[in-house]
Amino acid sequence: MKLPDFKPPTLTELRNWWQDHRGEGDVERLILEVQYLRLLLLGLRDEADAAVRLAKAVDRSLIARESPIMELRIRLAQAVLRVGEIDDTPRHDAVPKNVREYARNPDAVKFEADARRRLEQKK
């Protein structure tokens, strides 16, 4: 079946529809299915990227532009770009910037402080 051109619903629109149509089982299932498939698409894109990295390590000719694995990778990337934001869930392994600052190498911090001090002295 050929689909007409259309603008995919954004994550915000899906969330708004979810709120507006609570209790409407068919609408809720449809929204859940759209989001499930988007998350699956995102995961498949990541797996295709990993496959390309592995193939590249084995034999670069495996990842020529016209190769099936590259075609898959490109099509998945295009589909993800078309949809836009898919998952805005904060990553559990993400570290806030202020926490990363404290984890920096003390020598690097001292070097940067010394450089800033020298710049201020030149002024």
Image: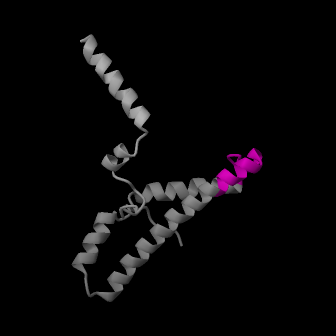
Q: Is residue 80 above or below residue 25?
A: above
Q: Quadrant of residue 84?
A: bottom left
Q: Which residues are magenta?
A: 51-67
Return the residue nearer the eye: 64 or 42: 42
| Place of residue 74 in the rendered image (x, y in percent of width and height, measured from the top left) | 58, 53
**Identity of the residue drawn at 26% across and 17% down:** 120
Quarter of the image where the N terminus is located: bottom right
In the picture provided, is 55 more to the left or to the right than 98? right
**Identity of the residue drawn at 57% across and 57% down:** 75
Q: How is the image coloured?
A: one colour
Q: Quadrant of residue 88?
A: bottom left
**Identity of the residue drawn at 68% across and 56% down:** 69
In the picture provided, is 68 more to the left or to the right than 21? right
Instruction: Give the mark count.
Output: 0
| Place of residue 52 in the rendered image (x, y in percent of width and height, measured from the top left) | 66, 53
Return the residue nearer the eye: 59 or 96: 96
| Place of residue 26 in the rendered image (x, y in percent of width and height, measured from the top left) | 35, 86
Q: Is residue 72 above or below residue 16?
A: above
